[in-house]
Image (cartoon, grey):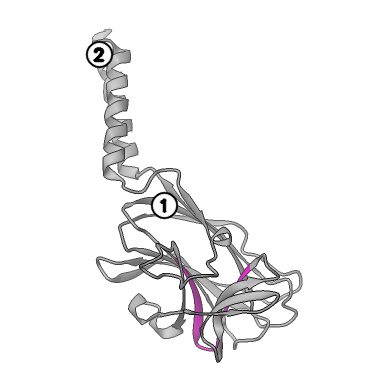
């Protein structure tokens, strides 16, 4: 067998392994600001929503079962937002001016945007947060990226909590990224809380977030090992 044929067989085996090992399709992606639901209850098991919006007490962020789905859609002429009920405006997740996707916490209540995995695979999360351009006051917010392992019922941290300060110029986190493996039912959770102060009507925070399926690290390692073995074998035969 020629070296070229052997290498081709390794590549085919790699692709077959990757397809069977990952149910999520490599290259698929979901962008929060393109898919903010405004017509169905987010996170419902009946609408296959990729995104779900929650309110959560600051002291129970370790267990998603304590999160409360923001299931009431409040629609006005220039904005729409998901909130707990008709009388509780924050925490909320919504749109302002038709295009700006924003989150707003409440005292001791974080606003949470969650992406859920419908199958296993590896994903890359690229995201950024910025103070809303309409926010002329406020005292800053806290933000973090969490991972809920549904089978183990445990919460872990993908990006530690940091503060987005209340200063002039509408500061931004800049583009941040994280990678993790997921199984069906797992959640990636972007959390905005009231920071080190209290909640203010000017604590609205814009979120941009995209989740993309990437090759599993294990399959990449398998491919590298196979190709390296072939190269070493070919070099040994040529001696």
Q: Residue at x 36, y 75 (%)?
A: 64
Which quadrant would the C terminus be assigned to in this image? top left
Front tag of 2 and 1: 1
Residue 187 position, x and y percent, is 38, 65
Q: Which residue is mark 2?
A: 236
Q: Residue at x 56, y 85 (%)?
A: 90
Horizontal side of residue 236 vs 74, given as left or right: left
Asked whether residue 161 appears in the rendered view, the answer is no
Vertical arrangement, residue 226 with respect to residue 126, above or below:
above
Q: Judge the density around disc 2: few (<14), some (14-19), many (≥20) Cα neighbours within 10 Å.
A: few
Report which quarter residue 66 is drawn in. Answer: bottom left
Q: Residue furthest bottom?
A: 87
Q: Residue furthest top?
A: 239
Q: Viewer-proximal residue, 43 or 165? A: 43
| C-alpha span from label 2 to label 1 | 38 Å
Which numbered circle lies on residue 36?
A: none
Residue 104 position, x and y percent, is 59, 79
Report which quarter residue 46 is drawn in. Answer: bottom left
Q: Residue at x 28, y 25 (%)?
A: 10
Q: Which residue is mark 1?
A: 123
Q: Are marks 2 and 1 in contact (CB under 8 Å)?
A: no
The residue segment tinted magenta is 101-114
Residue 145 is inside the magenta segment: no
């Amino acid at each position: 067998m020629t070296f070229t044929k052997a290498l081709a067989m390794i590549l085919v085996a790699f692709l077959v392994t990757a397809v069977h090992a990952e149910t999520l399709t490599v290259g698929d992606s979901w962008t929060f600001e393109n898919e903010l639901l405004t017509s169905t209850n987010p996170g419902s098991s009946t609408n296959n929503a990729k995104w779900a919006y929650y309110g959560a007490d600051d002291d129970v962020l370790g267990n998603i079962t304590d999160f409360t789905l923001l299931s009431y859609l409040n629609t006005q002429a220039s904005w729409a937002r998901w909130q707990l009920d008709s009388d509780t405006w924050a925490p909320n997740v919504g749109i302002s001016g038709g295009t700006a996707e924003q989150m707003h916490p409440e005292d001791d209540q974080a606003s949470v945007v969650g992406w859920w995995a419908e199958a296993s695979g590896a994903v890359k999360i690229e995201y950024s947060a910025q103070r809303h351009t309409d926010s002329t006051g406020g005292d800053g917010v806290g933000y973090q990226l969490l991972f809920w392992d549904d089978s183990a019922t445990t919460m872990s941290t993908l990006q530690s909590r940091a503060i987005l300060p209340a200063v002039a110029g509408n500061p931004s986190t800049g583009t941040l990224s994280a990678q993790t493996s997921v199984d069906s039912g797992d959640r990636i959770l972007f959390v905005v809380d009231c920071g080190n102060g209290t909640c203010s009507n000017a604590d609205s925070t814009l979120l941009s977030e995209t989740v993309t399926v990437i090759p599993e690290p294990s399959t990449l390692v398998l491919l590298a090992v196979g190709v390296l073995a072939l190269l070493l074998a070919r070099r040994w035969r040529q001696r």
